[in-house]
């Protein structure tokens, strides 16, 4: 790990950029720049799978699907570490403690390296059994194990790279953070056809290209952090022990939060299966279309988090409240635009993917009714950012698991009975309305209680909605 001098004066004095200026501009710049990076990742993943499909062996395509399911678990861990490092650093940056932010980042990255090494080793050894449990057999199983083992070896590299990119966002450096993901996507996109076809490495070539992309993330994120923000402080075990508790307090809930989504999606897939292959194909198109059409909304949580974190560190609660408002307005505007475009293009989408019957119906109802309801997903993403940066990360976990269980099961069952296959997806969207509204209400309430002294940020609670206001009382 690159190091800078521990002396506070050695770190460049960078003003916490989100403590002043137009908040709508901050929200828009951070969200749009982050979404550009997400689009590059989504497109590269799509092209990656498309190139493998050109090899003409369905077992290879199936292998990537199985491996990706397990790799998502490792990604959830990495993302949780990234959220913790970014949120804690942004808070210290907002307080003006740049040296403390560097030391915290050192502890967080050290923990990230240690935990990712352990997880990567365990998953590498357990890959055959885990993939078999998912249903992989024969040639698909053998290829999935090979692909997975190559990619998972780079988990520590990916972890440090993502955490370092998170530091750039914590400093408000949206442009350089965006550049990290763009370069990584470009590296993957360029190397994929070379490794797969020119060198003839096939599926393993795709895995090696993914590993190279992870190294690209590390290099392109590490350089600007060292050059412009003082890099990392020398590792101190005593400091590490002090930092471990807050790091774990954010990392574990963030991991739980991210794992909730595939659980909800698996429930929906199970509910759609009885309606046949066309329905499942329509859902697959919706899943990929959602990522691209609403990429800006998916970027909101990571984009808004540093803005909230810096202002929380500076005690500027009015700006936190206004950030929440502006983020919701921004999300509503983008959802309205995406809704209009999907309404106009839903027939074309069905034609391109050669969908018929149930598949076309799903695309139509997604464009007509499900798309506008995505504003409630956006509200939950914004709320998650608030909770993660306001020392209440468990609230994010509870809301996400609630949304993806009790907000899914009864609604998709009822939707299936009333509207068939499209009703399943409509039910999933309707079930999320309550949790989007609840999350936003809790976020505004939490900011208000902090501002009045009715709640103490350093005294966590499991009852955010009750109790009478008492100065510095534990959350009721």
Image (cartoon, rainbow, N blue to C red):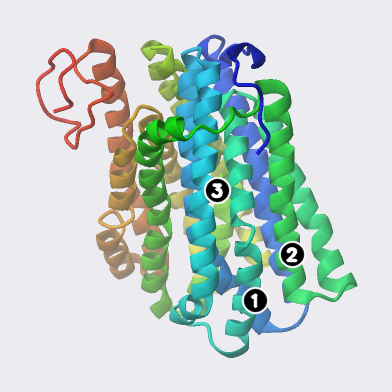
SS at mark 1? helix
The x and y percentages for residue 381 are 43, 39
Instruction: Answer whether labels 2 and 3 touch (C-beta < 8 Å).
Output: no
For the residues labelled 2 and 1, the Cα–Cα distance comes to 11 Å
Instruction: Answer whether labels 3 and 1 touch (C-beta < 8 Å).
Output: no
For the residues labelled 3 and 1, the Cα–Cα distance comes to 23 Å
The x and y percentages for residue 271 are 36, 71
The x and y percentages for residue 92 are 47, 20
Foreground mark, 3 or 1, reads 3
The x and y percentages for residue 435 are 30, 43
Q: Earlier in the sequence, mark 2 or mark 3?
A: 3
Q: Earlier in the sequence, mark 3 or mark 1?
A: 3
* Residue 300 visible: no
Foreground mark, 2 or 3, reads 3
Q: Is residue 182 above or below residue 355?
A: above
Residue 162 appears in which quarter of the rendering?
Answer: top right
Q: Label 1, on which residue?
A: 146
Residue 52 appears in which quarter of the rendering?
Answer: bottom right
Q: Label 2, on which residue?
A: 208
Q: Nearer the viewer, residue 70 or 11?
A: 11
């Amino acid at each position: 790990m690159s190091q800078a001098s521990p002396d506070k004066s050695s770190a460049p004095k960078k003003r916490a950029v989100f403590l002043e200026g137009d908040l709508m501009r901050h929200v828009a710049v951070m969200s749009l720049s982050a979404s550009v990076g997400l689009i590059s990742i989504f497109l590269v993943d799509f092209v990656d799978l498309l190139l493998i499909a050109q090899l003409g062996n369905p077992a290879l395509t199936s292998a990537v699907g199985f491996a990706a399911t397990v790799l998502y678990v490792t990604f959830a861990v990495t993302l949780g570490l990234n959220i913790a490092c970014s949120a804690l650093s942004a808070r210290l940056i907002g307080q003006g403690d740049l040296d403390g932010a560097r030391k915290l980042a050192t502890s967080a990255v050290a923990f990230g390296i240690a935990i990712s090494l352990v997880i990567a080793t365990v998953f590498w050894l357990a890959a055959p059994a885990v993939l078999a449990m998912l249903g992989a057999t024969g040639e698909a199983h053998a290829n999935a194990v090979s692909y997975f083992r190559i990619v998972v070896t780079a988990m520590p590299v990916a972890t440090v790279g993502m955490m370092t990119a998170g530091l750039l966002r914590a400093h408000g450096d949206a442009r350089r953070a965006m550049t990290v993901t763009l370069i990584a996507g470009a590296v993957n996109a360029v190397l994929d056809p070379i490794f797969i076809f020119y060198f003839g490495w096939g599926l393993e070539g795709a895995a090696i290209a993914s590993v190279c992309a992870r190294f690209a993330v590390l290099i392109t994120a590490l350089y600007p952090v060292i050059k412009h923000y003082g890099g990392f402080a020398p590792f101190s075990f005593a400091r590490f022990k002090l930092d471990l508790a807050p790091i774990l307090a954010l990392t574990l809930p963030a991991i739980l939060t991210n794992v909730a989504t595939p659980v909800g999606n698996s429930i929906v897939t199970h509910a759609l299966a009885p309606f046949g292959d066309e329905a499942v194909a329509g859902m697959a198109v919706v899943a990929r279309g959602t990522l691209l059409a609403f990429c800006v909304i998916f970027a909101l949580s990571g984009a808004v988090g540093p803005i909230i974190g810096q202002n929380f560190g500076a005690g500027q609660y009015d700006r936190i409240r206004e950030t929440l408002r502006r983020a919701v307005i921004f999300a509503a505007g983008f959802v309205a635009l995406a809704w209009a475009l999907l309404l106009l293009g839903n027939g074309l989408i069905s034609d391109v993917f050669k969908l018929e019957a149930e598949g076309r119906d799903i695309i139509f109802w997604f464009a007509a009714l499900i798309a506008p309801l995505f504003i409630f997903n956006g509200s939950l993403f914004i709320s998650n950012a608030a909770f993660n940066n306001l020392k209440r990360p468990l609230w994010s976990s509870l809301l996400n698991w609630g949304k993806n269980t009790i907000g899914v099961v009864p609604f998709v069952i009822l939707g299936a009975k009333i509207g068939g296959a499209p009703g399943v997806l409509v039910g999933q969207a309707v079930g999320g309305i309550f949790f989007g509204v609840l999350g936003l209400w809790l976020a505004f309430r939490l900011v208000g209680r902090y501002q009045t002294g009715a709640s103490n940020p350093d005294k966590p609670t499991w009852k955010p909605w009750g109790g009478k206001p008492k100065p510095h009382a534990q959350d009721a």
